[in-house]
Amino acid sequence: MDIRQLRYFLAIANEGQITRAAKVLNMEQPPLSRQLRQMEQELEVTLFDRSGHKLYLTSAGEILRQKAELLIQQFHETIQEVKEVEEGVLGILSIGAVVSCISLLPPKIKMFREQYPEVTFKISEGDHFLLAKQLEQRTIELIVARLPFEATSEMSPYSVLHLPSDPFVAVLPSDWELASTHDSIRMHDLADIPFLTLKTDETTAMHNRVMNECKRHGFEPAVICECSSVAIIIALVASGIGGTILPRSVMASFPLPVIKMLSIADINSESDVGIVWLKDRYLSKSARHFIALFQED
């Protein structure tokens, strides 16, 4: 079995019919059918259930599909890596970032563009699970994320570059008395405010860290809204609806006069952040140089 046959197999698996797969591959149906029979004979398994109008993968076929996609991806990455030996740093660098880490990117992208002006960027935003899927599909190469990275995968282990921890701060409407009369507060000052929290259905580590810190100080916050969007939470704060606790770096993207950021004197926790990529997998020159910028901090 070779790479060409694996491509044939994947086309059939994706299309569900040999006729459609043959059109996608720009070849005749009989040769494609022969190639499939040869693969099944060589492997001594049945790869597709042929009992209906559409072909469905058997359990053996599903395993081969997973491995074939990985092998073909690695094959293309190997070719690209060899080509890059003689090339400069150029092309498109695709990065993912969780919503609370977007503010970490602009200064690094500006520095990077000054050194490597031939590189352009494609940036995706989402939670850990969405970005992990894109990472494994190789539509992005890196993720800037809060740690721990909650979309752990045994199939695709991750490498992580830990960045300096990010202190938590209180974010309140500027016309609240607490905000207008203080630049620093203590945790118990937040016990009675309407509380907003950054959380998705699947990524909960940072939310849990803030909740545990509140409990450590003897109160349960009066949560009136759970939200997956930093921008929405800031808009709610700006409207006077409630207050929240966020990593300090988040606020760099929201210089609004109607909100105020206050340090918390007695908080005993910080938000960990890092760069995440697939372990033992190819990284482009652009990605390696971009990681290096963070290592200089």
Image (cartoon, helix red, strand yellow):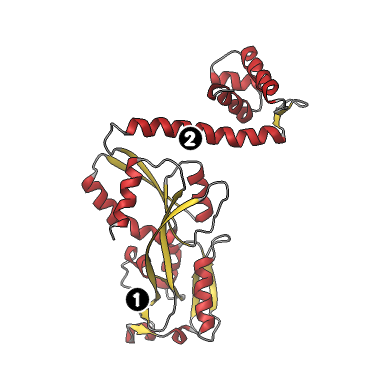
**Left or right for 90, reference 236:** left
Mark 1 or 2 closer to N-term?
2
Report helix, strand or loop for mark 1.
Answer: strand
- Compared with 12, 195 (above or below) is below
Q: Nearer the viewer, mark 1 or mark 2?
A: 2
> Is residue 198 visible from the viewing direction of this image?
no
Q: In the visual, does 98 lie left or right of 156?
A: left
Q: Secondary structure at mark 2?
A: helix
Quarter containing the C terminus: bottom left
Other residues around mark 1 within 10 Å, as few (<14) / some (14–19) / many (≥20) = many
Q: State the residue position of label 1.
A: 260
Q: Position of residue 215 (x, y in %)?
A: 54, 81
Q: Tell me the kind of residue under disc 1.
A: Lys
Kindly identify which residue carries mark 2.
74
- Residue 205 coordinates in the image, percent (x, y): 52, 66
- At 47% from the left edge and 31% from the top edge, which residue is drawn? 75
Measuring from the top left, give residue 289's x and y in whole percent. 30, 47
